[in-house]
Image (tube, grey):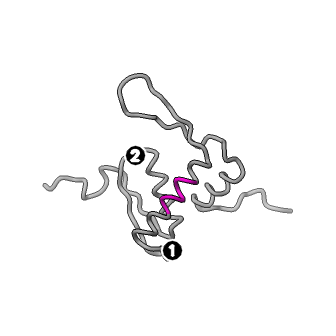
Amino acid sequence: MGSSIPSLQSPDSLVDDLAARVPDNVWVKAPVSADQGPAVWQDITWRQLRTAVDFTARWIESELGVGDGHEPVAYTGLNDIRYPIVIMGALKAGYKVSSLPPGQCSLDQPAV
C-alpha cells in the first residue's frame, strides 16, 4: 500500500512544481502601492513567482557564485512580497538561508 503522505520538497522546488502544474493560479494578492487611499491589489501567479525566484537565484549566483549547500546567507529587508522571493532564490542558488525579520538584526538596532 502506497503512502498518502507527500514527500517533502524544498520551497523553491515546490514553486517549480506548482508553476508547471497550475501556472496561472494565484499565489498571492499583493498591494500595488503603499499610497494612502483605496487599496489596489494585484494577483501574482505561480508562473510569475517562479520567474522572480529564478531571476533572483541567477542574480545571487552572479554576485556570490553558486552555493555549495552549506554556505549560509542572510537577508533582512522589508516584510513584503520580496522576502519569500529572495529566500527561495537563495535556496535555489545553493545557499542555506538565515532570514532576519526587520528589527531582529543587531545591525538594525541603535548602539546603546
- Is residue 78 placed above or below 94 in the rendered structure? above
Q: Quadrant of residue 7?
A: bottom right
State how many labels appear: 2
Q: Is residue 2 magenta?
A: no
Spot occupied by residue 48 in the image (x, y as percentages of width and height) = 57, 48
SS class, disc 1: loop
Disc 1 versus disc 2: distance between alpha carbons? 25 Å
Q: Earlier in the sequence, mark 1 or mark 2?
A: 1
SS under mark 2:
loop
Q: Residue lying farthest right?
A: 1
Q: Residues within 10 Å of mark 1 (few under 14, many from 20)?
A: few
Residue 62 pos. (x, y %): 44, 69
* Residues drawn in magenta: 51-57
> Circle 1 is placed at which residue position?
69
The disc labelled 2 sits on which kind of residue? Asn
Neighbours of disc 2 within 10 Å: few (<14), some (14-19), many (20+): few
Query: What label does residue 95 carry, if any?
Result: none
Query: Can you say which quadrant of the picture contains the C terminus?
Result: bottom left
* Quarter in which the N terminus is drawn: bottom right
Query: What's the amino acid at mark 1?
Result: Gly
* Closer to the camera in the image, 4 or 77: 77
- Residue 79 tag number: 2
Q: Would you say the residues marked 1 and 2 are in contact, meaning their CB atoms lie under 8 Å apart? A: no
In this view of the protein, which residue sits in the foreground, 3 or 106?
106
Q: Quadrant of residue 12?
A: bottom right
Residue at 65% of width from left, 61% of height from top? Answer: 8
Task: Describe residue 53's horizontal placement relative to residue 46 as left or right.
Answer: left
Q: Residue at x 38, y 63 (%)?
A: 74
Position of residue 28 relative to residue 21, above or below, is above
Could you say where residue 39 lies in the image, as x and y percent from the top left?
Answer: 45, 26
Spot occupied by residue 13 in the image (x, y as percentages of width and height): 62, 61
